[in-house]
Image (cartoon, rainbow, N blue to C red):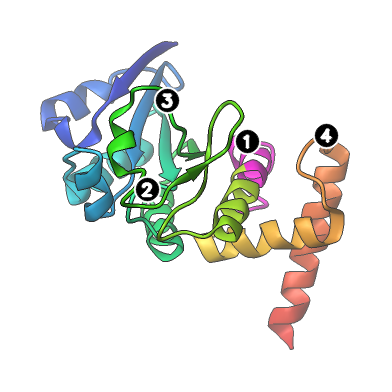
């Protein structure tokens, strides 16, 4: 398998057609989206054509055999819980093979430092120095996203429950599932595959029962 990092909005029609020539699963593409929220993108000096990014990612997912690994970063300057949810919904709708949710980390000497004071960014004192709170996102909100990221890795990115999780189409759906697991089990790691299956079945049954009321 060949592995490339891409800027999706920079892919030309000719490049997209070339990607179609690769055999299924013969190409793994890393698409570092990070955010669609314009104030956050401006703060990290990143330019991105949202419409073209999403169109090209959807084309790759639907028209080629390439596997797309996209990412979002929570805790960027100016980003809120609501804008992060919107970013997730946009990117998830392009049907990536994997959607990695990361929490902003403070790297020594990184340009993000210039926003630390103005955005009231509080970082963990311990490696990997994740942001714990910002002026626009609370500690509790970031903890919710961190737990969601873990459960999303288990139940979506790992690929074992791709069909079973199809009813979960939005950030709100995945947040509800995440809160269900945390409230009932208080566990984010060392969940066996058998237990994962049981938890998902329990949740989906409860969801169907609630919807029927």
Q: Which residue is mark 3?
A: 107
Q: Which residue is mark 4?
A: 190
Q: Mark 2–mark 4 contact, CB under 8 Å?
A: no
| Vertical arrangement, residue 141 with respect to residue 21, above or below | below
Mark 4 or 1, which is nearer the eye? 4
The secondary element bearing badge 4 is classed as loop
Mark 3 or 4, which is nearer the eye? 3
From the viewer's perspective, is 50 left or right of 175? left
The residue sitting at 19% across, 51% down in the picture is 51
Q: Residues within 10 Å of mark 3 (few under 14, many from 20)?
A: few
Instruction: Please state the horizontal and vertical placement of residue 121, each as a whole percent of the image.
Output: 43, 47
Mark 2 or 3, which is nearer the eye? 3
The secondary element bearing badge 3 is classed as loop
Q: CA distance from mark 4 to mark 1?
A: 17 Å
Q: CA distance from mark 2 to mark 1?
A: 16 Å
Q: Quadrant of residue 195?
A: top right
**Could you tell which of marks 3 and 1 lies nearer the N-terminus?**
3
Q: Is residue 155 magenta?
A: yes
Which span of residues is magenta-colored? 150-168
Which quarter of the rendering shows the C terminus? bottom right
Q: Which residue is mark 2?
A: 94
**Could you tell which of marks 2 and 3 lies nearer the N-terminus?**
2
**Could you tell which of marks 3 and 4 lies nearer the N-terminus?**
3
Q: Which residue is mark 1?
A: 159
Q: Quadrant of residue 16?
A: top left
Q: CA distance from mark 3 to mark 4?
A: 29 Å
Instruction: Please state the horizontal and vertical placement of residue 131, each as a whole percent of the image.
Output: 50, 42
């Amino acid at each position: 398998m060949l592995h490339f990092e891409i800027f999706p909005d920079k892919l030309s029609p000719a490049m997209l057609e070339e990607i179609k020539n690769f055999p299924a699963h013969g190409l793994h593409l890393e698409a570092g989206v990070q955010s669609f929220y314009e104030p956050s993108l401006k703060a990290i000096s990143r330019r991105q054509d949202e419409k073209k990014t999403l169109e090209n990612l959807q084309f790759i997912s639907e028209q080629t055999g390439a596997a797309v690994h996209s990412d979002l970063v929570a805790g960027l300057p100016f980003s809120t819980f609501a804008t992060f949810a919107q970013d997730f919904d946009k990117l998830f709708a392009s049907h990536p093979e994997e959607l990695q949710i990361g929490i902003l980390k403070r790297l020594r000497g990184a340009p993000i430092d210039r926003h630390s004071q103005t955005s009231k960014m509080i970082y963990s004192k311990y490696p990997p120095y994740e942001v714990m709170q910002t002026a626009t996102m609370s500690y509790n909100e970031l903890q919710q996203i961190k737990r969601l990221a873990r459960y999303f890795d288990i139940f979506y990115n790992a690929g074992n429950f791709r069909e079973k999780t199809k009813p979960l189409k939005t950030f709100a759906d995945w947040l509800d599932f995440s809160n269900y697991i945390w409230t009932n089990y208080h566990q984010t790691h060392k969940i066996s595959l058998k237990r994962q299956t049981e938890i998902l079945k329990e949740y989906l049954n409860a969801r169907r029962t609630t919807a029927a009321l």
